[in-house]
Image: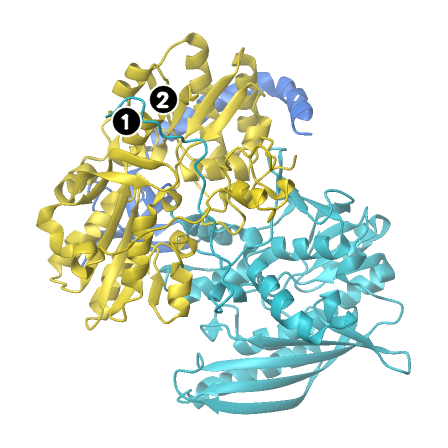
Chain colours: A cyan, B blue, C yellow
């Protein structure tokens, strides 16, 4: 072993990864930074308009008669098709119902386009359809248009579904990402990480089994109750899907230019979800949810809104998790269980299990 | 290199010529290789890293250390709360 | 979670922190060489709660980030082979090679699979007899027993289609290299608890003695880190330089004999290049000649890779005006375009996101 090795350990840097601009990689679908960059770089410039630029979960347009519609579209490519707590069909309906509802709208109609892989068992398709029927009934909406296409074996994971949902925005209400205001209280309607970990578990390639169930659920009734309690005092509602709670809060911080502070010990996580995350090195803040909302509401209406949400199905475990400030603008901070403060960033690409 | 968490051994068996076990992490379970802890018994805790038990966890050591530390807490409680208000801002 | 949650108890952590505050009388520089410990410190903001006299330096403890560019390029070359299923730990997917990463190899049709355990890679070999399965065997000593067992298992099962690309790194030579560097400021080490779970800590007393540096074998939970720092501070204040074990519930002096025996059986020491640092003699392990047939480098003949490093340092991007200083993650140190410090941080999209994700604001 040499003395004076001359190696400089303090300027060692971790290698910066590539930007991946020439080909699509899986990280582009994760809902995090890579997804956002892709949309900003490729899609928005071509279709640029104020509705699209707002960057919310649904586009809101005004009809000449003064009513506003919220319209959202989504494609569902989850694999496996069936997982504990749900399936691609339920996910398709609930996901779009929720995206419409968070704009303060009453979801009314949904369309569904199916891409079926050659060789898909009809029995599987029947199960998916049955599940969609149950979900539409629970949400109180109607499926009014559809389409099916078949692609060759190997060109789809059995089945892909695209949905478009339309709702009528409640008069006098305009919740959207840019409206977060200093002092707003942030409610989270329940435990995080359930859906993402249920799917990872069902996929089987990481080899663990658990009792974790997806939280896929239609939340339009919960939204209705919350709006009944607080009306336009609700500034933002969003469902933290891919990219998790952290990504959604970052999106809102960026859209509004405000700073968000959350408290780690207020964020509910089910014990098996936490255990699975610990094992794989995942952070529950970044794991997808399909039956939860964040609600930003004026402080004097926070208690009422919390009570209203807790009285709803799917909202029993709601908590106040933080509030909005003016600084640091566009960022999310978290007060840890030890009282220190750290930055909570947006998800970058895919969440990957780590050994380090 | 480091991500290893404690899990409880629920079951021990042989598979493909290797000593394996079913480990519970608190609601989540996984099959894990126990070749490096041949002395393991059902009910023991082990540190699991990339699907292998690295070592058994000594529950006695764990209890002793935690007890020692817990004893530190009682007399110091007022002191530390004041200190933390100063430092966490 | 049992034996985990107890070590995150804020009351206990704060009591130990209070003790650290009481014990410290002068500045000290303490280093941990373990990605997992760095992760814990930054995720919980523990460094903010320490007395200002204590400077925590994060050593090159992430095997993902220190894996040499040459190894990454070899991995990419092998993974691009249409006969190969390339199995890897998740952390490696985003690590950049000279021109691309495993993500792009997968996007171009390479069969790259993330596995949780090397035994899963062996299973892939059993299930895909018509393909070659190559496992990217990186890691510190902690991961060596698992990586080695995959080779022994492949041999026992008579698999002809399994091989590993080895890029193991060892901690003690790195510690020696750090301590013997002319610019070294490190006065105490927190030794990586899981490395020591396998290897024991018998390798450290000679190092502590030679360089007069206290070493504390430390676990990974917030309470472990704080107690480890407390023990280090007490030794520093007393001028002593022994080796102590904070992680006694998992680590013994001798370590895991079975694990060490298997490592000796399958691997041998070699020189290794640490990315971003340089060559540290004897700091790596590679397959012994008896296990050559499982060596992917020999099976796939990847000698012709010519690695060329792209700018690592984020300060380089600042110099080029691509990033603003306040986007630099230079942790607790001012960094300006005029005087970049050589970033120790990586962007949030980094292979190791611990640094950026959990940074504090200035």
Report the chain holding disc 2: C
| Quarter occupied by residue A55 | bottom right
The percent position of residue A334, horizontal first and vertical second, equals 64, 42
Position in image of residue A24 (x %, y %) = 49, 69
Considering the image in quadrants, where does the N terminus of chain A appear? top left
C33 left or right of C265? Answer: right
- Report the front residue among B44 and A343: A343
Q: Is residue A263 above or below residue A19?
A: above
Question: Which is nearer the eye, A234 or C289?
Answer: C289
The residue where tag 2 is placed is C215
Residue at 27%, 28% in the rendered image: C252
Q: Position of residue A204 (x, y in %)?
A: 38, 65
Give me the residue at 12% from left, 51% from top: C291
Callout count: 2
Residue identified by numbered label 1 = C201
Quick one: quadrant of the C terminus of chain A? Answer: top left
């Amino acid at each position: 072993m040499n003395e004076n090795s001359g190696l400089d350990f303090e300027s060692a840097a971790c290698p910066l990864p590539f930007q991946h601009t020439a080909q699509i990689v899986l990280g582009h679908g994760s809902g995090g930074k890579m997804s956002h960059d892709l949309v900003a770089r490729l899609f928005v410039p071509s279709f640029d308009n104020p509705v699209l630029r707002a960057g919310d979960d649904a586009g809101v347009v005004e009809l000449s008669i003064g009513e506003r519609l919220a319209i959202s579209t989504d494609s569902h490519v989850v694999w496996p098709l069936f997982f504990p707590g749900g399936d691609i069909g339920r996910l398709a309906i609930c996901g779009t119902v929720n995206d419409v509802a968070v704009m303060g709208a009453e979801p009314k109609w949904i369309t569904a386009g199916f891409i079926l892989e050659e060789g898909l068992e009809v029995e599987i398709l029947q199960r998916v359809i049955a599940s969609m029927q149950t979900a539409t009934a629970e949400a109180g909406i109607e499926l009014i248009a559809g389409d099916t296409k078949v692609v060759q074996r190997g060109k789809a994971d059995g089945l892909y579904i695209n949905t478009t949902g339309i709702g009528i925005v409640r008069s006098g209400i305009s919740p959207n990402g840019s409206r977060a205001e200093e002092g707003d209280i942030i409610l989270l309607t329940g435990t995080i990480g359930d859906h993402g970990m249920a799917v990872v578990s069902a996929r089987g390639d990481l080899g663990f089994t658990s009792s974790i169930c997806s939280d896929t659920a239609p939340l339009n009734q919960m939204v209705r109750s919350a709006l009944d309690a607080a009306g336009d005092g609700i500034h933002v509602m969003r469902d933290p899907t891919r990219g998790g709670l952290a990504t959604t809060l970052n999106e809102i911080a960026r859209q509004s230019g405000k700073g968000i502070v959350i408290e780690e010990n207020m964020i509910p996580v089910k014990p098996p979800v936490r255990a699975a995350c610990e094992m794989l090195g995942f952070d529950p803040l970044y794991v997808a949810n399909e039956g939860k909302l964040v609600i930003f509401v004026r402080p004097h209406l926070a208690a009422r809104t919390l009570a209203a949400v807790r009285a709803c199905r799917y909202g029993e475990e709601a908590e106040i998790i933080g509030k909005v400030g003016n600084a640091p603008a566009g960022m999310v901070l978290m007060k840890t269980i030890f009282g220190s403060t750290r930055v909570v960033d947006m998800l970058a690409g895919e969440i990957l299990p780590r050994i380090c | 290199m480091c991500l290893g968490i404690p899990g409880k051994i629920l079951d021990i068996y042989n598979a493909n010529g290797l000593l394996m076990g079913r480990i519970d992490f608190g609601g989540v379970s996984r099959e894990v290789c126990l070749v490096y802890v041949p002395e393991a018994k059902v009910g023991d805790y082990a540190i699991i890293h990339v699907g292998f038990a690295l070592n058994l966890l000594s529950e006695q050591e764990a209890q002793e250390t935690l007890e020692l530390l817990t004893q530190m807490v009682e007399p110091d409680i007022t002191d530390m709360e004041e200190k933390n208000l100063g430092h966490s801002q | 979670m049992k034996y985990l949650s107890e070590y995150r108890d804020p009351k206990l952590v704060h009591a130990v922190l209070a003790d650290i505050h009481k014990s410290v009388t002068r500045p000290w520089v303490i280093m941990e060489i373990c990605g997992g410990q760095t992760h814990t410190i930054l995720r919980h903001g523990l460094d903010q709660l320490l007395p200002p006299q204590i400077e925590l330096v994060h050593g090159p403890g992430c095997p993902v980030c220190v894996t040499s560019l040459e190894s990454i390029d070899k991995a990419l070359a092998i993974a691009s082979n249409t006969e190969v299923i390339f199995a890897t730990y998740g952390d490696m997917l985003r690590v950049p090679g000279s021109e691309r990463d495993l993500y792009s190899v997968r996007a171009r049709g390479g069969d790259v699979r993330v596995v949780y355990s090397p035994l899963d890679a062996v299973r892939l070999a059993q299930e895909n007899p018509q393909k070659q399965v190559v496992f990217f065997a990186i890691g510190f000593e902690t991961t060596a027993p698992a990586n080695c067992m995959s080779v022994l298992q492949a041999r026992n099962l008579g698999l002809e289609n399994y091989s590993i690309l080895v890029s193991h790194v060892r901690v003690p030579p790195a510690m020696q290299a750090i301590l013997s560097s002319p610019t070294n400021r490190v006065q105490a080490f927190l030794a990586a608890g899981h490395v020591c779970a396998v290897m024991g800590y018998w390798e450290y007393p000679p190092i502590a003695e030679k360089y007069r540096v206290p070493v504390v074998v430390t676990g990974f939970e917030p309470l472990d880190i704080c107690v480890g720092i407390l023990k280090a501070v007490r030794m520093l204040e007393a001028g002593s330089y022994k080796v102590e074990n904070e992680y006694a519930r998992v680590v013994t002096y001798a370590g895991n004999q079975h694990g060490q025996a298997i490592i000796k059986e399958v691997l041998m020491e070699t020189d290794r290049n640490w990315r971003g640092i340089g060559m540290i003699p004897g700091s790596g392990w590679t397959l012994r000649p008896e296990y050559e047939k499982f060596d992917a480098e020999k099976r796939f003949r990847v000698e012709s890779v010519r690695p060329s490093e792209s700018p690592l340092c984020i300060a380089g991007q600042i110099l080029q005006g691509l990033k603003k200083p306040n986007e630099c993650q230079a942790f607790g140190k001012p960094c300006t375009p005029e005087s970049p410090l050589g970033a120790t941080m990586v962007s949030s999209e980094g292979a190791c996101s611990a640094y950026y994700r959990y940074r504090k604001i200035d």
